[in-house]
Amino acid sequence: MADVEFVNTEYGKNWVRLLHIRRLGGKQQDVRELEVCTSLTLTSQKDYLHGDNSDIIATDTQKNTVYALAKTKGVTTPEQFGLDLCHHFLSSFSHVTRVKVAVTMAPWRRMKIGGQDHAHAFIMTPDAVRFCNVEQARKGTPVVHAGLKDMKILKTTQSAFKGFIRDRYTSLPEVDDRCFETVVYSRWRYGTLKGLDFDAAWNTAKSTILEEFAGPPSTGVFSASVQKTLYDAECEILGRVPQISEIEMTMPNVHNFTVDLSKFGLDNKDEVLMPVDKPSGIIHAAIRRKTTAKL
């Protein structure tokens, strides 16, 4: 056998689904539906080397722990639930050296009936999916990333793309005004958890992306490129949420091409478009505070 060494070992339970109902008094209730993945790293690799399972915390046990902690700790935010799981495994098992938890929350929203919030009825409104990743090593502080994904947004005007390099393979025309559609993925890291409201921070990040993309309701805002819109949103989020130390965003440029109706004697002034999912442009940037910046 070749002379080898472990680079990393971890194992866990994926896609544990959980619906937690919180009874607030009277008929008032709240819900959180989560999908949880747990992963543990142990002090030894004897399970890999010798088939010795004496240190293994079974993945079924990890699944049951998710449900048990939902009962004993409750579920307020996905980030806090991830922190609770990390603390449980590190405090309960001395041979666990690292815990990773990934949580995705289903976008349930309270129903409005006649303009009033319903006490215990909800509707799925998937405008954006919330997720987080929590990791903690023994004797280390928790590292918390939060984010959103699958947020599909579109504006019909005030977006341009011109001034790019043209060579013999370029066929894309320059445009002063176009339809701008994208599906936002964003993930950020909290540099500190001090004074942090997870719900407020997430809602601020989401609303900031929408504001930078759309602009004021009556006038909108001009976008010179997807890159510029993405960067402006990231900078504004860092300005509004001081606990966030770094952020990354991906915004694919989902195309909507003008349909040629001239053969039917019709003049199509960008009123009838053909959505095209693939291929799409892909724009990504990650930024962080400079080391001299203070929270």
Image (cartoon, grey):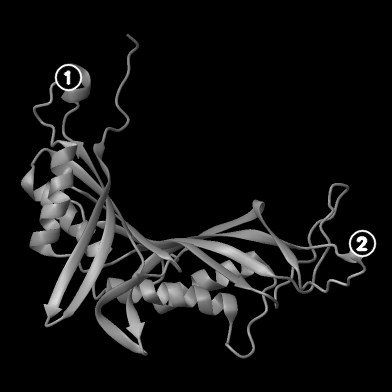
What is the CA distance from the residue labelled 1 to the residue labelled 2?
71 Å
Amino acid type indicated by mark 2: Lys
Return the x and y of residue 172 as percentages of the image width and height: 81, 57
Residue neighbourhood size for the residue with mark 2, other residues' Cα within 10 Å, grouped as few (<14), some (14–19), many (≥20): few
The residue at the point 70 percent across, 73 percent down is 159
Q: Nearer the viewer, residue 84 or 269?
A: 269
Q: Earlier in the sequence, mark 1 or mark 2?
A: 1
Residue 294: mark: none
**Quadrant position of the C terminus in the picture:** bottom left
Residue neighbourhood size for the residue with mark 1, other residues' Cα within 10 Å, grouped as few (<14), some (14–19), many (≥20): few
Residue 21 can be seen in this image? yes
**Quadrant position of the N terminus in the picture:** top left
Residue with the mark numbered 1: 51
Return the x and y of residue 17 as percentages of the image width and height: 26, 52
Residue 263: mark: 2
Q: Nearer the viewer, residue 159 or 256?
A: 256
Amino acid type indicated by mark 1: Gly
